[in-house]
Amino acid sequence: MTTLYIVRHGQSQANAAGILQGSQVDTPLTIKGQQQAQLVGQQLAAKKISFDLVVASPLLRAAQTAAIIAPRTTTIFDWRLKEFDYGNWDGQLEKDIWQKFPEYFDAQHNLLPRAADVNRGETYSQVTARLQQLFTQLAADFPQANLLLATHGFTIKLMLNMILAIKNLSSLNEPSNAGITKIELTSQTATLYYFNQSLIAEL
């Protein structure tokens, strides 16, 4: 059994500024984001959860989060964990995007399908394909391991869609900064144990 503890990065500078932050935007953690990661690391240690390996997105906010949570664990960086690419929306203020393109968001500002037709970014199927490839590889290479995956909000949503076949993905909010999702893999199965669990008090 391959056990994945999947953490969304702590608050980044772009998060704090309300900037839409996909794979083209690479800002570091804020002080609050660093504190969130530190507290998650402490809580995981208190629960005696340790990791055989860390697999992190190469984007700075995820790499920093991984280093803070598990500083003594070997870390490898995998591009397949990068955030969804919002195309030419990346780096713009979220409120401006919501106002200019309301037909691509629901009332909770969750992204709706087919936005790539306008922003020329990634499609759900493109990201799902790389995530499926990654999960298959992790299950094969680490069949009896605890892995920490440090990644991004919309990428985690697409992971859940991949294994649960959610018909209306916009009904699922992105996980909060430093929220943890647990998935167990075998060569034949992927099972969700929990989504967006908070191990920290609200900062």
Image (cartoon, rainbow, N blue to C red):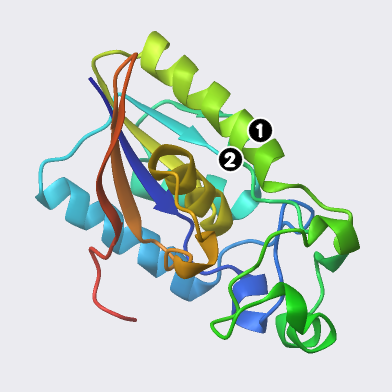
- As displayed, is residue 5 above or below residue 120? above
Q: Decide which of 144, 12 is in the foreground and name it.
A: 144
Q: Which residue is mark 1?
A: 79
Crowd band around label 2 with a 10 angstrom C-alpha radius: few (<14), some (14–19), many (20+): many
Residues tagged 2 and 1 counted as in contact (Cβ below 8 A): yes
Q: Image check: 11 left or right of 111?
A: left
Which tag, 2 or 1, sits closer to the chain's start? Answer: 2
Q: Image check: 172 left or right of 142?
A: right
Where residue 201 sits, quadrant-wise, is bottom left
- As displayed, is residue 99 above or below residue 201? below
**Residue visible at 41% across and 10% down in the picture:** 141
Residue 175 makes an appearance in the image: yes
Provide residue 104's location: percent of width, then percent of height: 73, 73
Q: CA distance from mark 2 to mark 1?
A: 6 Å
Provide residue 39's location: percent of width, then percent of height: 28, 63
**Residue type at tag 1:** Trp
**Residue visible at 78% across and 89% down in the picture:** 99
Q: Which residue is mark 2?
A: 57
Assign the N terminus to one quadrant of the image: top left
Provide residue 147's location: percent of width, then percent of height: 33, 30
**Residue type at tag 2:** Ser
Could you say whether the residue bearing mark 1 is in a helix, strand or loop?
A: helix
- As displayed, is residue 49 above or below residue 175? above
